Image: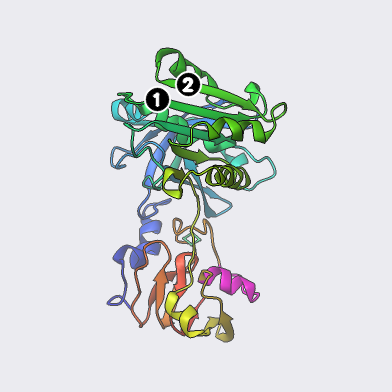
Amino acid sequence: MLGNQSSLTLYFLPLLQRLASGFLPGQYRASLLCRQWQTADMLQLSFNVSGRWPGFVPGQHVLLTLQHNGRYISRPFSICSPLSLWQSQQHIQLCCKINRAGEFTPLLNQLKNGAVVNISKAQGDFYWQQPATAAVFVAAGSGITPVAAMLLSQRHWLAPVSLFYRCRGSENAALLSELTQLAARQPLFTLTLSDSRTEPAETLQQQLMTNSSKQFYLCGPAGFMQQIRTALTNSGVSAAQIRQEQFGLAIAAPAEHMAAGLQLSASFIRAGISTQVTLNPQQSLLQNAEQHGLAPRFGCRMGVCFQCVCDKVSGQVRDIRSGALSGHGAEQIQLCVSQPVTELVIKL
Ligand code: FES
């Protein structure tokens, strides 16, 4: 099994975690400096991040991992602070919408100053690609966080930039004071608040139409972004002019399976009992197992916490994040980021 293993760290993980509690491969330690409410439900957290962390491009997000009830759980959050804060002090800030009924975000409000958490490398390709081209940013809700990082990081302003910020009144607009100060000192930047309580979405869409030759950056709830995107494309804005943020893992079915109409199956073995299931290739092995009433251990569901690691006895899987194919023999895999490629035998 050791010879088949794609990562030695994965093989020795249980031992490493016994030696260093809280150790997670590919993660970096960050200690909390302070918490501050931006709005009634947006909490800003400032962290001092390990000097080993490779840094970020404004607009990117990190996975923040906490240990809770004996397991690791993770969520993605965009960095909202300017690059200069990281470069000068190794600090970053995350703006997190607190869902009081959720499992994860209420824990953030219980973190004490000095608490140590894990963060991933910065991820995502939502960043300001052409600062020399006139651009329009459209943000709503926590979608303001990557947009604020991009705008607040900008040193050399080369073209006019507008931000349309959709919110339920200024009291619910996180990072508003930082953005207002930027608009006051930077003549090429204009900030427009669009109050969803008093202004219909059509008014915002009409304002955007007058900018149809520019580059658009959208970030907000999925329904909001879809509405804006449709309005823009209907008014002649090309897909290449629109960039938008997307969190989470997109799983595409392997083209060869779709073409051949192949059906795959797996044997999941637990406590010596084998359960044969038909696999949906558009889902991770974790989702497949759950849909058949099996309940594998998991934490983040994003490939971060390694709690879903189990033994593949035979068969081949694809890593959903990188597309890398595994070997065909025995090795350990992460169920949440593995997609079936061939018939499989897996020990849960
Ligand atoms: S559930 Fe966290 S790595 Fe799979």
Task: Examine the rendered structure and indicate whether residue 218 appears above or below residue 265.
Answer: above
* Tag shown at residue 160: 1
Q: Residue at x 33, y 78 (%)?
A: 327
Q: Is residue 93 visible?
A: no
Quick check: is 248 in the magenta stretch? no
Nearest the viewer among 80 and 139 is 139
Nearest the viewer among 42 and 115 is 42
- 246 sits left or right of 140 in the view: left
- 286 sits left or right of 4 in the view: right
Q: How many marks?
A: 2
From which residue to which does the magenta span run? 285-296
Q: Amino acid at mark 1?
A: Pro
Task: Examine the rendered structure and indicate whether residue 96 appears above or below residue 303.
Answer: above
Q: Position of residue 303 (x, y in %)?
A: 45, 59
Q: Secondary structure at mark 1?
A: loop
Quick check: is 288 in the magenta stretch? yes
Instruction: Give the residue at mark 2.
Output: 190
Q: Position of residue 194 (x, y in %)?
A: 62, 27
